Image (tube, rainbow, N blue to C red):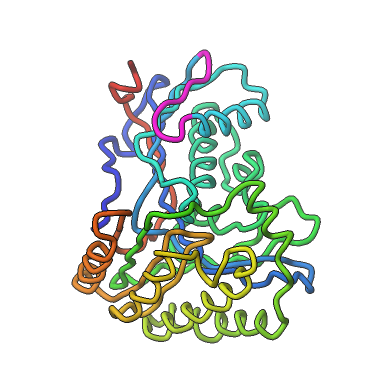
Amino acid sequence: MAQRFADPHPPTAPHSASDAVFVEAPARLHFGMLDLRGALGRKFGGIGAAAPSPSLVLEAQTAPTLHADGPAASRAAQFARRVLGHYGIEQGAHIRIHAAIPAHSGLGSGTQLALAVARALAELYALPSDTETLARVTGRAKRSAIGTWIFAEGGFVLEGGRRRGSQHAAPRLARFAMPDTWRCVIAIPPGKAGMSGEVESAAFTHLPPPPERSVMRVSHLVLMALLPALAEGDLATFGRALTEIQCINGRWFAPVQGGAFSPGASTTLIERMTDWGAAGVGQSSWGPAVYGIVAGDEAASKLANLIRDDLAGTGVVYAGPFANSGARIWRGPPSRAAAG
């Protein structure tokens, strides 16, 4: 089951200027978009939740120049340069990534890394630290704001889409804690990486607008099935609504994705997880990450083992309760590796 990074130095403990800043941020699951038409002046919108695992963990210290090491170090350095340059900070930082979210897997690795780097630098240099500002400075939340609000709060998030011409992240409309008994099993099978960056932007420009009826159906499912079921802890109804939303979204993205879901192992696993007892199934963002939601540890362990057997030693599988808190930030003595 999922475990979060241990915090050996409580946030309330006294710290010195030489202490390092640590940030841990959960991966995000993107459950689907609300509207690709934008006829009402807002586009995209969406639903998602903080994954049980994996998490990003990084450490940062002030330094004369900028240096980063660990997985995704070069990308972390790019985000740091952007933040330092935006605020005219002439000093640098030493950033060490202890654990990373797999890149281009559909779990929001880029947004969580950008926000974690920005949040660490904000702590080190007494900069604005509200999450929406961090997203704007690092160039995130230009389309979906699910990852931004997950970083801030964790749990389940509904966001209302970005207003045409706005420079602000899409507003968070609702946030719920995921029920304590629900478990999520996530699989990242081998295969084609999910789209990102310019390739993703190009894909969106080539998508035909979906039928208004299907857009209305998604909103109806969210408002009158998904959210009430979440509030009442009704997993069966939540799962049926989520699975239908995923299927509708899949038809929207099929022209550029090659099918309702990422072709190959992702599609096969989604089909099999339903047969194996998952109440709700789907693909996170462009995949290849897929997920199934069940009740309790026993069901999660059973589903995870069936997926591992099906993958025959390839890919990776995570299982556990949803993360109902956002990023954690604390200070403490620098790790030996980072100090060296």
176 vs 62: above or below: below
Horizontal side, residue 115 vs residue 201: left or right: left
Q: Main secondary structure of the magenta part?
A: loop
Is 278 inside the magenta-drawn segment? no
Q: Quadrant of residue 229?
A: bottom left
Residue occupying image coordinates x 63% and y 63%: 256
Residue occupying image coordinates x 39% and y 71%: 268
Q: Quadrant of residue 122?
A: top right
Please provide percent x and percent y for residue 252: 63, 73
Horizontal side, residue 312 vs residue 225: left or right: left
Please provide percent x and percent y for residue 338: 35, 22
Horizontal side, residue 297 vs residue 293: left or right: left
Image quadrant holding the N terminus, namely bottom left
Image quadrant holding the C terminus, namely top left
Please provide percent x and percent y for residue 194: 52, 54
Q: Quadrant of residue 272?
A: bottom left
Residue occupying image coordinates x 60% and y 75%: 251
Query: Hey, which residue is sitting farthest top in the picture?
Result: 64
Is 70 inside the magenta-drawn segment? yes
Question: Where are the magenta residues, as a range?
Answer: 64-73
Residue 202 or 126: which is nearer the viewer?
202
Horizontal side, residue 56 vs residue 163: left or right: left
Residue 23 or 330: which is nearer the viewer?
23
Please provide percent x and percent y for residue 157: 52, 65
Q: How many marks?
A: 0
